[in-house]
Image (spheres, grey):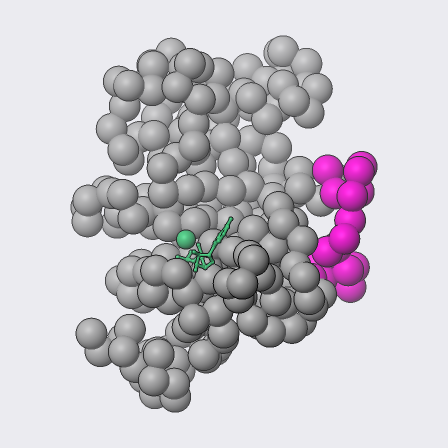
Amino acid sequence: MIRLKGISKHYGPVAAVRKVSLGIPRGSIYGIIGKSGAGKSTLLRVMSLLESPDGGEVYYGDERVDGLDGKELLFRRRKMGMIFQNFNLFASRNVLGNISYPLEIAGFPKKAIYERVDELLEMVGITDKKKALLRELSGGQKQRVAIARALAAGPEVLFCDEATSALDPQTTRSILALIRELQSRLKITVVLITHQMQVIRSICQYVAVLHEGELAEEGKLDEVFDSPRSQAARELIYE
Ligand SMILES: Nc1ncnc2c1ncn2[C@@H]1O[C@H](COP(=O)(O)OP(=O)(O)O)[C@@H](O)[C@H]1O
Ligand SMILES: [Mg+2]
């Protein structure tokens, strides 16, 4: 369970996130939706310990984790994987080199890395692309590489920041199906932020609606979709 308690984050005069509290059940696919600028990415960076909040608390289980540093922070961060809209892959490395990167950093021996990469390529369905250069891949294939890299070290949580926003509808469906399959196979928690309602609708069990930095609404997907209470949720759902 990941729990946020009264999280706030400012950038100069801009209140990107304001007093957001929510709980993400372990093993769930949890969506956070909101318009552009609503504070989704900021909240995700706080949740994934890339940034410290200026107010509030972050818990993983019973442990408070905002404010961790040094080895403790590294240890926590190793249990998280992240994927992004623009993939954030290394253009200078091939598929193998990208996926093996976090394993090299973690100091795994070469043989273990090769075995693990093969397993990951299989998991994301691109075994034939092992030696391919990034420029030879489609967007969907690049996102599969990014997913493999994110999962390489066996994280407990996968954070997805607009992971399908640069993909066409068909590729989006295939990537979402893959995320769902991996979530149930690996029993990880998935936190997915997006401005696309269709993405939330197709794989999330829970949803939180962010509006101008504040939590407008949170709950089980069906409940929020069937009877949205906030104006922000109604706008997103009925638009
Ligand atoms: N590093 C930053 N420096 C300054 N302002 C930022 C930074 N990151 C986000 N913001 C501002 O915070 C607000 C929320 O941004 P963001 O979290 O990226 O929203 P979203 O992901 O929902 O589009 C926006 O007004 C944005 O301009
Ligand atoms: Mg964003």
Locate residue 236, reporting x and y percent: 29, 73
Q: How many labels does the image show?
A: 0
Locate residue 198, reporting x and y percent: 26, 62
Residue 128 is left or right of residue 149, and the answer is left
Residue range of the region highlighted in magenta in the rendering: 58-74
Picture residue at 35% right of the left edge, 78% below the top: 233
User: Can residue 73 be found in the magenta stretch?
Assistant: yes
Q: Can residue 29 be seen by looking at this rendering? A: no
Picture residue at 36% right of the left edge, 37% below the top: 86
Q: In this view, does 107 lie above or below 218?
A: above
Picture residue at 34% right of the left edge, 84% below the top: 231
Locate residue 64, reporting x and y percent: 77, 60
Dividing the image into 4 quarters, which one contains the N terminus?
bottom right
Q: Quadrant of residue 220?
A: bottom left
Q: In which quarter of the image is residue 154?
A: top right
View extreme (front): residue: 13
Residue 229 is left or right of residue 154, and the answer is left
User: Can residue 37 be found in the magenta stretch?
Assistant: no
Residue 116 is left or right of residue 148, and the answer is right
